[in-house]
């Protein structure tokens, strides 16, 4: 370094040109990897050769100072430009050689990026809710950890009532006032009461959500299941309204030429209670009835429990098993497929 600095000290604008020549020549021979080092040597803030040159302006004889300064500055700018151009040129050349050397085959199709999607149960849940949304039902939600007073008492399933056997309950292991009162909801029906507590008739609401039961798991039973509860309460609601709404649901969900049938069933919170089945094609070209939901006219006591006058208000309710509908829709024969997180299964939907 020392001799160079000496030469700068005594530099004239002529020697600036010598410096420029040297800088540009070495730049031409510098590859991508050496560019930063070249920059440090010539333009580095501390002791780059052009930086030192600029610093030496004040040591020049007064009458040469201005010209010298201008030339040194021009050199600095030119070298910066040259460096940028060199960088660009090298990059371009690299891309060209990549393209022509066959390292990139531009005729190959792109690699598909994996795209996420909704779980089949979620897709079905959304479709069900959308159909009822079009019919004027709002969506509400309720807690998965529920009180017994909503899950059972509010919907007419008192303690010791045999109907509690219909749902083998998963209790939260905590006693409140000497009783176990907290549980994982066994159905979405407690939300009938919760909605009526918050809202005056006319009520039209669907409540989607997960439910939990202490079940021995098999092809049609899981300990977690998804339901959509429906509730309509108003003056003058009749059984024909229930049938009309559910018929419309079946047709919008499964196709316009769908048939439905109702048969009597028992649920403590409705009277009368029904189960609805839709006709479904069988392999031999015929059809069979497949039950997809429970429903009924809201029991007057449930309406009274919620604080409404049951001589004025009537209502209907229904509870749809979402996994059931999804299984039907795609011909899935085992409910356990849904919750095994097997991508080979899930990617098909
Ligand atoms: N909660 C019932 C169950 O989990 C389903 C049900 C039946 C809901 C009839 C209703 C209804 O609203 O009216 O099995």
Image: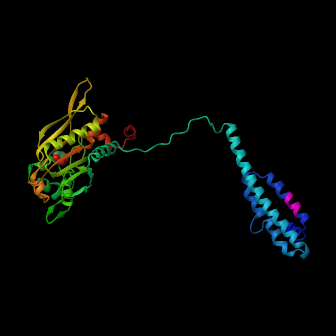
The quarter of the picture where residue 118 lies is: top left
Comparing 101 with 312, the one in front is 312
Q: Main secondary structure of the magenta part?
A: helix
Percent coordinates x, y for residue 346 in the rendering: 37, 40
Percent coordinates x, y for residue 197 in the rendering: 18, 60
The quarter of the picture where residue 81 lies is: bottom right
Q: Please determine whether, in this image, residue 49 is positioned above or below residue 89.
A: below
- Left or right of 120? Residue 149 is left
Q: Residue at x 85, y 59 (%)?
A: 20
Percent coordinates x, y for residue 140 in the rendering: 26, 54
- Left or right of 43? Residue 334 is left
Comparing 343 with 117, the one in front is 117
Quadrant location of the N terminus?
bottom right
Q: Residue at x 24, y 47 (%)?
A: 227
Q: Please determine whether, in this image, residue 94 is positioned above or below residue 278.
A: below
Percent coordinates x, y for residue 103 in the rendering: 65, 39
Quadrant location of the C terminus?
top left
Comparing 304 with 188, the one in front is 304
Residue 225 appears in the rendering: no
The colour style of the image is rainbow
Q: Indicate whether residue 17 is drawn in magenta.
A: yes
**Which residues fall within the magenta stretch?**
16-21
Q: Indicate whether residue 56 is drawn in magenta.
A: no
Q: Residue at x 53, y 39 (%)?
A: 111
Comparing 194 with 38, the one in front is 194
Residue 323 appears in the rendering: yes
Q: Residue at x 27, y 33 (%)?
A: 256
């Amino acid at each position: 370094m020392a001799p160079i600095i000496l030469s700068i000290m005594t530099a004239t604008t002529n020697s600036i040109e010598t410096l420029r020549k040297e800088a540009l020549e070495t730049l031409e021979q510098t590859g991508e990897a050496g560019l930063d080092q070249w920059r440090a040597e010539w333009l580095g803030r501390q002791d780059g050769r052009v930086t030192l040159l600029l610093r030496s302006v004040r040591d020049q004889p007064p009458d040469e100072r201005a010209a010298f300064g201008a030339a040194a500055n021009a050199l600095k700018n030119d070298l910066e430009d040259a460096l940028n151009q060199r960088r660009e040129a090298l990059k371009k050349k690299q891309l060209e050689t990549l393209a022509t050397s066959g390292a990139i085959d531009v005729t190959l199709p792109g690699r598909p990026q994996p795209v996420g999607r909704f779980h089949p149960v979620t897709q079905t849940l959304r479709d069900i809710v959308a159909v009822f949304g079009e019919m004027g039902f709002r969506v509400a939600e309720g807690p998965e950890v529920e009180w017994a007073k909503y899950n059972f008492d509010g919907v007419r399933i008192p303690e010791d009532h045999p109907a509690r056997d219909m749902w083998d309950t998963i209790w939260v292991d905590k006693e409140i006032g000497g009783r176990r009162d907290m549980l994982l909801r066994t159905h979405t029906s407690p939300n009938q009461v919760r909605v009526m507590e918050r809202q005056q008739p006319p009520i039209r609401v669907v409540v989607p959500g997960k439910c939990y039961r202490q079940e021995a798991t098999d092809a049609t039973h899981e300990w977690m299941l998804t339901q959509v509860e429906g509730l309509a309460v108003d003056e003058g609601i009749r059984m024909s309204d229930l049938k009309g709404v559910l018929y419309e649901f079946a047709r919008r969900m499964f196709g316009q030429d769908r048939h439905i049938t109702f048969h009597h069933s028992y649920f403590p919170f409705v009277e009368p209670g029904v189960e609805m089945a839709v006709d479904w094609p069988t392999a031999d070209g015929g059809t069979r009835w497949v039950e997809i939901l429970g429903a009924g006219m809201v029991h007057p006591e449930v309406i009274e429990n919620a604080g409404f006058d049951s001589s004025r208000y009537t209502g209907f309710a229904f509870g749809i098993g979402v996994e059931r509908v999804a299984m039907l829709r795609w011909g899935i024969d085992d409910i356990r497929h849904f919750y095994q997180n097997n991508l080979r299964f899930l990617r098909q939907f």
